[in-house]
């Protein structure tokens, strides 16, 4: 089991910045990737950014060049720095951890609201 706790959401005007953090506990040594997903009202959940245990990153096209995912191994924390925010970035953001063993399991945090006003 992995427990995830997000923080850092809030409200900001278009063009502003926010930094999300996700603290992990439990089977952290078994985590293969940690990702940020988001779900906007009336839309499906979408992958925003991910980082592997080796440090490789990937981003959704819609956030490339604006968002940066990073990891602090010592603090078991993954961060998402979001710059140049747009109203379409408004969503609930979820931190997830994927463990590939035992058939694969993805663990989800409780989510944090990000609201960008124009």
Image: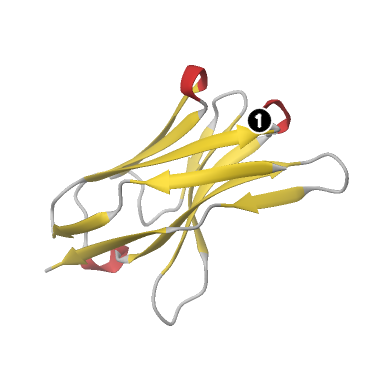
x and y percent of residue 112 in the render? Answer: 38, 57
x and y percent of residue 33 in the render? Answer: 62, 37
User: In the rendered image, which residue does mark 1 sit on?
Assistant: 28
Q: Name, please, the residue furthest toward the bottom.
A: 42
Image quarter in which the C terminus is found: bottom left
Question: How many C-alpha atoms fall within 10 Å of the one at disc 1: few (<14), some, or many (≥20)?
Answer: some
Q: Name, please, the residue furthest toward the right.
A: 102
Colour logic: secondary structure
Q: Residue at x 51, y 35 (%)?
A: 57
Total marks shown come to: 1
x and y percent of residue 54 in the render? Answer: 61, 23
Q: In the rendered view, does 109 fall on the left or right side of 28?
A: left
Q: Which of the two residues, 95 or 50, is positioned nearer the viewer here?
A: 95
Height in image: 55 above or below 80? Answer: above
- Label 1 SS: helix
Q: In the rendered view, does 9 fall on the left or right side of 107?
A: left
Residue 12 quadrant? bottom left
Q: In the rendered view, does 30 fall on the left or right side of 89?
A: right
Q: Residue at x 51, y 63 (%)?
A: 46
Q: Which of the two residues, 104 or 68, is positioned nearer the viewer here?
A: 104
x and y percent of residue 35 in the render? Answer: 54, 45
Height in image: 52 above or below 38? Answer: above
Image quarter in which the N terminus is found: top right
Height in image: 24 above or below 54? Answer: below
Residue 19 quadrant? top left
Q: Which of the two residues, 3 or 51, is positioned nearer the viewer here?
A: 3
Q: Residue at x 21, y 54 (%)?
A: 85
């Amino acid at each position: 089991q992995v427990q995830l706790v997000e923080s850092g959401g809030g409200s900001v005007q278009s063009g502003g910045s926010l930094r999300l953090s996700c603290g992990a506990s439990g089977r952290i040594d078994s985590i293969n990737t940690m990702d940020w997903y988001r779900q906007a009202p009336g839309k499906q959940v979408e992958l925003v950014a991910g980082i592997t245990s080796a440090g490789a990153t990937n981003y959704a096209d819609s956030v490339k060049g604006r968002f940066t995912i990073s990891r602090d191994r010592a603090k078991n924390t993954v961060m998402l720095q979001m710059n140049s925010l747009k109203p379409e970035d408004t969503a609930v953001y979820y931190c997830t951890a994927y463990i590939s063993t035992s058939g694969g399991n993805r663990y989800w945090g409780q989510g944090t609201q990000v609201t960008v006003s124009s």
